[in-house]
Amino acid sequence: MHTLRKKLVPALITSLCAILLPLSGCKIVPNDQRAKTTGSSANQTAEGFNAAGYVDSVWASQLTPHFDNKANDLATVIAAVKADLDKAGHDYGHRAASEGSPWSFAVKSTGKVVSVNTESRAGTLIVEIASDAGPQQITLQIGPVVKGTAIRDSLPFFSFANVTNQIEFAQVGRAFNERALKEVEKPLAELKTPGTAVEFKGAISLTSVPETFVVTPVSLKAAGSAQ
């Protein structure tokens, strides 16, 4: 009986897989292989991977020139987005190839500080900019907590293909945000007073038309400053 059971069990498993394969892609993984794949590449970063190091290596050579040369006027982008997000994305934005990815935009503008909120860890600077529809208030993320990955997603030279897995992809997104905070930290200290004129460049990322446009800045300075 024991011998018969040993023969029947594998046969039964094989039969079940043959039935379920078209539905679920049934796959048998031996216990020793299952143990090895518990810490698979889906849950680990490549040996020696350094997200902050990567960001530092491309900030001055690729990111800064991209925003200097390709950032579009924020008021123009906002008007286009309100009229038709997809058309605005095609005209001014960038989107990853994957289905459902947001439209991301490199933008620039000049405005006046309205208020600053540093009580929340997700600090913000409210800036009023001019537009054809009249003055408009937008929000700059000033941290130390920055929501989203607009900077990473706005860059045409970086994509998921540059990394091994989702963990590394997320790490690079956070590293771009952290480097951006360092870039704006020093000038921000002198630009918080309401009425101060400021210039900024940054990124926005959208899946729909928002009530308030939120920019993650990569640079911030006093208007007219040579910094």
Image: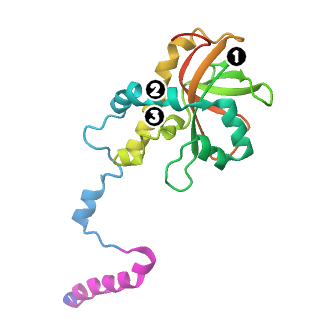
User: Where does the image place residue 7, in percent across and percent down from the top left?
Assistant: 22, 87
When asked about the image quadrant of residue 63, the answer is top left
Location of residue 94 with respect to 178 vertically, above or below: below
- Magenta part mainly helix, strand or loop? helix
Magenta span contains residue 79:
no
- The amino acid type found where label 1 is placed reads Lys
Q: How many numbered markers are drawn?
A: 3
Q: Which residues are magenta?
A: 4-26
- The amino acid type found where label 3 is placed reads Arg
- The amino acid type found where label 2 is placed reads Thr
Q: Nearer the viewer, residue 97 or 25?
A: 97
User: Where does the image place residue 179, in percent across and percent down from the top left?
Assistant: 44, 25
Q: Nearer the viewer, residue 177 or 36?
A: 177
Residue occupying the point 44% across, 41% down: 170
Residue 174's disc number: 3
User: Where does the image place residue 19, in percent across and percent down from the top left?
Assistant: 40, 85
> Label 1 belongs to which residue?
112
Location of residue 179 with respect to 162 vertically, above or below: above
Residue occupying the point 61% across, 18% down: 199
Local secondary structure at mark 2: helix
Res. 73 in view = yes
> Label 2 belongs to which residue?
64
Residue occupying the point 71% across, 34% down: 212
